[in-house]
Image (spheres, rainbow, N blue to C red):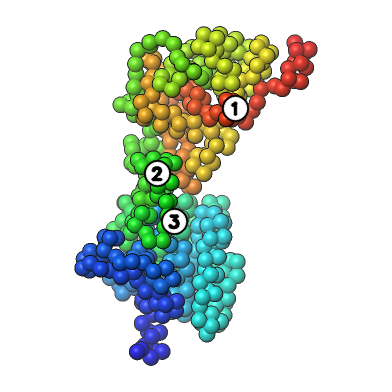
Amino acid sequence: MLNEKELLKSWINSPIAFVKSIWGLSPQPLICEKNHEHIFSCYGDFIRGEMITWQQHKVLLAVEKAMRGEAPKRISVVTGHGIGKTALLSWLIHWFLFTRFNSQIGCTAPTSDQIYDIGWKELAVWNQRLPADIKKLFEWSTTHYKITEAPQTWWARARTARKESPEAFAGLHGDNVMLIADEASGVADEIYRVGEGSLTNKDTLVVLVGNGTRLEGYFYDTHNVDKANWQNLSFDSRESPVVEPGFAERIKNKYGEESDEFRFMVQGLFPKIGQIIDGNWMPLLSEQDLNLVADIGGMIEAKLGVDPSGEGSNKTAFVVRDNFRAKVAKLEDKSNPKGIAESMATLSTHYSIPSGKITVDAFGVGANVSQEYALALGERVQAINVGEKADDPERFTNKRSENYWRLREWIMKGGQLVKHPAWKQLLTIYYKRNLSGKIQIMSKDDMYKKHGWESPDVADALSLCFNKEKSDGSTTRAVEGPSNAELAELANIY
C-alpha cells in the first residue's frame, strides 16, 4: 500500500491513477496481448460505474505520455458521438487542478449549451462524487471551478467560443496551463489564433475533442498538415461500450452509411474530401454524376420550379421534374411578374401540374409572381424564401442548401436530366460545412464576384422542385400567395 505522500506523487503524471483513487474507476480490461490495445474486440466486458472505457483510457494514456515527455503535450481526438468525452474532460480538469499549484485551465466550446449546459454541469456531477476531504478544496460556479486556497490564481473557467469575442484561450499565465476545446471543429480559428501563444507553448497541455465536421480550420489541421506536432486519436461510436443503443443504426437510416454525417457522427472521421477550391468549397456534383438522356415525352406527377428574373442579364428558368427525370421546360430572357405567371399557367396545363406543386423563388421579381398567378387562375402557387430556415435546421443552413442537397441525392440515386446545355450550371454549385457542421451552398454573389460564374438560374429552378411537400400535398413555404380576401381586394384594384 502506498502512503499518502507516495499516492500524491503517483497522481502528478498519471490521471489514470488519480481517477482510480478518487472515484474508484479502473480501465476496461485488455484481454489480448498488449500490442492489440488498438482493437476494441480485445477488451473485456465493461462494467458501468466501475470502469473507464478503453477509449477514455487511451486518451488518458496519451496525457500520461505527454507528461512524461514521451510525446507532444498537444492531443487531438476526432470521435463519433457517445464515447464518454464529457466525463473524460471532467476527470482531466479535476486531476490537473488538484495536482498542480496555481494551475489555470481554459475551457471552450462553440455554444453555451455545449460548454455550460453539458460540459460544466458534468463537472458539477463529478464534484459531488469527490471524497469529502477533497471536495471541500473545490468551489464550483456557473463559469469557474476554483481551488478555495487561491481562487484568484488557481482555477478552470468556461467561455463560449465566439468569433466576435475570441478571448476564450487568452489571459492564462503561469507554469501550469491546460487548454480544452470541446466540439473543437466548431471553434472558430479566431479563438485558436488569440490563444496561439499558449497553444504553441511546449509546457501547455492542450486537449481538443470533437466530431470532425469540417474539412478546414485549426482542428482539421491538427490531424493533417500539422499532425506531426500532435498526438492524434480517432474513435468510432460503434466501438464504445457506453454509446446509446441503436444510435449508429438511427444515423445510418436517417442519412445513409455513405453520408458525411455517418462519418463524423459515428465513425469518428472527417467528411469525404472532394475537389476543394479556395475557402474549402467542394463541388456538389461532378460531370460524371450528371446522367443526361434524350427527351422521351411526358412526365408523371410532375412538379414545376421557377426561378424568376427581371430585365437584367439573368434568365427566368422553368424546370419540370418527376421522380425519374428533370427537363428545362422554358427560358425567358426578359420577364415581368405577369408574363412569368402566364408561362407558369401554360406549363402547368401542358404537364398536368397542380398549382400546389409549382414552387417559385419569392425573392425580388418573384415576390409578385404568385399574386399575378392567383389573379389569373384564382389558385395559389408556393412562393418560398430560400434563405429561410430549413426543415432540418440541424443539418442545413437554410432552405436553399437543403433543397440543393435533396437534388444531389436524387441525382446520385439515378435521377436523369433531359439533355440541355444549361445543366452545366450544376457543376458550379459548391458546398461546405460551416462552423456548426451544417451544409451551406455558396451564394450567387460569391459565385460571380470570386469566380466569375453566371447566375445558376436553371440549377436554382431545379432545386426548387425539391422543396418538401406537406402531408396535405402543398409545399412548405415562408412566403404565401394572397388569401381569398386579398384576392378580392386585388380584383377591385385591377
Please indicate, yes or no, whether residue 336 appears anywhere in the rendered image: no
Q: Earlier in the sequence, mark 3 or mark 2?
A: 3
Q: Quick one: quadrant of the N terminus?
A: bottom left
Mark 2 is on which residue type?
Answer: Lys
Disc 3: which residue: 244
Mark 1 is on which residue type?
Answer: Asp
Mark 3 is on which residue type?
Answer: Glu
Q: Could you tell me which residue is drawn at 41 percent across and 61 percent down?
A: 242
Image vertical order of residue 436 relative to residue 380, above or below:
below
Disc 1: which residue: 472
Q: Quick one: 66 or 199, which is closer to the camera? A: 66
Q: Quick one: quadrant of the C terminus?
A: top right
Q: Earlier in the sequence, mark 1 or mark 3?
A: 3
Where residue 7 sits in the image (x, y, percent)?
Answer: 38, 85
Disc 2: which residue: 252
Image vertical order of residue 371 relative to residue 254, above or below:
above
Where residue 124 sits in the image (x, y, percent)?
Answer: 55, 70
* Tag in front: 2 or 1: 1
